[in-house]
Amino acid sequence: MATVVQKFGGTSVGDTTKIKRVAERIKRRMEAGDQVVTVVSAMGKSTDKLVDLANDITEDPDPREMDMLLTTGEQVTISLVVMALKEIGVEAVSLTGWQAGIQTECTHGDARITDIDKSAVQDYLDEGKAVLVAGFQGISDEGNITTLGRGGSDTTAVALAAALGAESCSIFTDVTGVFTADPRYVEQARQMPSISYDEMLELANLGAGVLHPRAVEFAKNYNVPLIVASSMEEVEGTLVEEEASMEKNLVVRGLAFEKDVTKIAIERLPNQYDTMSMIFKLLAADGINVDLIIQQTTSDHALNVSFSVDTDKLDRALEILEENKAELCYSTVRHQSMLSKVSIVGSGMISNPGVAADMFETLAKEEIEVMMVSTSEIAVSAVVPEMDMVRAANALHSTFKLDAEELEKVEALTS
Amino acid sequence: MATVVQKFGGTSVGDTTKIKRVAERIKRRMEAGDQVVTVVSAMGKSTDKLVDLANDITEDPDPREMDMLLTTGEQVTISLVVMALKEIGVEAVSLTGWQAGIQTECTHGDARITDIDKSAVQDYLDEGKAVLVAGFQGISDEGNITTLGRGGSDTTAVALAAALGAESCSIFTDVTGVFTADPRYVEQARQMPSISYDEMLELANLGAGVLHPRAVEFAKNYNVPLIVASSMEEVEGTLVEEEASMEKNLVVRGLAFEKDVTKIAIERLPNQYDTMSMIFKLLAADGINVDLIIQQTTSDHALNVSFSVDTDKLDRALEILEENKAELCYSTVRHQSMLSKVSIVGSGMISNPGVAADMFETLAKEEIEVMMVSTSEIAVSAVVPEMDMVRAANALHSTFKLDAEELEKVEALTS
């Protein structure tokens, strides 16, 4: 008898009809002979409603109390799913984060899981019960209720799977799996049967919203096979594992892209060893994440620094730079919005140095201006105008043979 | 520095504006130099909404899961009140039932408090913080979340007051105090400055909804001075204490009345020692509370038994009697609805044997038919037609000198 962990997100439990469907699905899985732990999020928009209540009261809600407030959302869902299971004759029990032994750091709003005391969950499984665990939440050493931040329910599921030594952790969501690119924009995109943790991590970090990076990292660290699949249809999903077992012959595995990117360029900074760290410390202190960074020295040894931020952080970033102009000693700040970032990901890149060149050649052929570039071992990202984003993604999808028809040709060649 | 416990019900925290008002009130109390623990209920109709969700899923929700579901309501309120307190500069912290150390029996839906570990609450009070505790909820020895049933938040407040050795426990509600009778029906009703635990207990049991009997009983057992007061206006409330300190010269202290009473009469039962217990065990097994009971022996030694139930239990009671007709061996069952119960309460009755006579004389003068009677040491109840209930209450209010003008006369006589 295998133990499996599965997670259903907010949309999948958005109303009582959907909750009954989740219960049916858990029942079928148990009838297949598995011990089933299910992690659920808050119902649909219920978290937003709770946030609205807090905002009615204060612009700056206390983080501890915000966690106290928001964790009620998942608690509602677990109880309703168990009621639905009992209604169809399945013995089940619900556990809040603290009841399920999810121990976290002592921070609020974005705590990391430090330990899991699996005993309560394991005991209920051994009694033959379906166990429902409230996602996104845990408890600190001081006994305070904490939350795990964005993607927290995914992390709860993966962490429980690791603690229980589960066979797999299925993340049920509103897509059928991980795609080579977002199929809403890239017509030729197709679902991947499998992908490696590292590739998934890059895709997740680069804006492919299907899985939260922290959950993928956790799965990688504890070697938990992750399955991304549809909560609506019972079709094959995508397996995320140590070594993607198929399509090894593809250098690039997937594409990610996101809009609302703004480039900020600071000109003529003093060329000192601590200039860069000063800028980015100031921004980080205000929670502004900087993505791509380009540093250039002018002919007269001044420093030009460009970086990209989310467009909604632009105003605050400009304020901070203005406030610190005297200290930073620059001449001007320019910015350009309406940009996007297009990235290619694939662990095969490490041994294929020509990939970046192929990327730029494709974009050049399409006459798409590349404004910033960044590379990692298994990804290349380019900042391009937002209006060219979809065209760039489609062209790259085709160049790197990710299109459905191309794949067949590749398979024919190598088989 | 005194410790005080106060409780605000669902209406008093019904929206964010009201929550801010509660925060202001806590602030003023702290500025007066007290250590303040505040127990709150779920916001307005939020419990009803949760119940609706459960009913969407099943007609028969699991009690453990129902407690898991419903306790989220108070958790939402405590976090919002603390946010509102911090917004106005008051250090505060929220605690769920289990965090506040409210230990209960292992039953769901109607658990009794078995113990309180006050250490967390006391520690936060000693740090100078306002402490907000989720009412109505606790935790069982097995670590399950439990609820205390109707009036549970009142009980939480009184129990915490007892555990903390608080100076008083204030129950803030939508009335300004305890009245001699419901002022919506009895024009001459007036608020009592004080009343004894026993009298309050009788009034609460007899349908005066202002306080839950269990909370009053708890207050009596631990000698916690209870104050019933308005959550809206800061005016003097009613003090509930061991010996009501005023108005000792009044034999009757208050009236209670309720409608939707039905009388069921079972005729010609066998006159056996276990007949009565058989009937009432059968009804109790189905959760049907029987109130007044009259037993009569006919001239030929058969037994006639009448009793009153809430009208909404009538159908089920008749079913049970019908199902068990063979065993019970009666001839017929009759019933009469559209009845009400009017009660007079006062600890002075013990030493004033004429009180019941005065009551019946008043009702006779008003030509109101008395269908059933029951007496306790400090109360007399009469079942009368529902259409006569308000008239009976007003007449009795006047007979027993509870009217505002009458009180002045009494005071003039005895001063």
Image (cartoon, coloured by chain):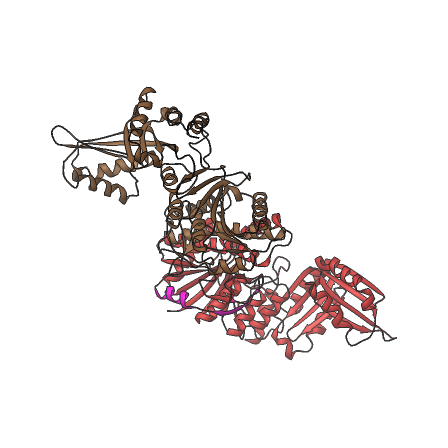
Chain colours: A brown, B red
Q: Is residue A272 left or right of residue A410?
A: left
Query: Residue A380 versus residue B400: which sits nearer the camera?
Result: A380
Q: Could you tell me residue A260's position as x and y percent? A: 35, 32
Q: Is residue B14 visible?
A: no
Q: Could you tell me residue B351's position as x and y percent? A: 64, 79
Residue A338 in the image: above or below residue B268: above
Q: Is residue A284 left or right of residue A72?
A: left
Residue B93 in the image: above or below residue B218: above
From this viewpoint, which residue is outermost toward the right? B300
Query: Residue B106 versus residue A365: which sits nearer the camera?
Result: A365
> Can you tell which quarter of the image residue A393 is in?
top left
Q: Could you tell me residue B53's position as x and y percent? A: 58, 48
Number of marks drawn: 0
Q: Residue at x 85, y 76 (%)?
A: B301
From this viewpoint, which residue is outermost toward the bottom? B351
Query: Residue A100 versus residue B198: which sits nearer the camera?
Result: A100
From this viewpoint, which residue is outermost toward the front? A415
Query: Residue A302 versus residue A223: which sits nearer the camera?
Result: A223
Q: Is residue A25 left or right of residue B91?
A: right
Picture quarter with the C terminus of chain B: bottom right
Quick check: is A195 in the magenta stretch? Answer: no
Picture quarter with the N terminus of chain B: bottom left
Quick check: is B124 in the magenta stretch? Answer: yes
> Can you tell which quarter of the image residue B335 is in?
bottom right
> Can you tell which quarter of the image residue B256 is in?
bottom right
Q: Could you tell me residue B235's position as x and y percent? A: 48, 61
Q: Is residue B93 visible?
A: yes
Q: Residue at x 31, y 29 (%)?
A: A355
Residue interval drawn in magenta: B104-127
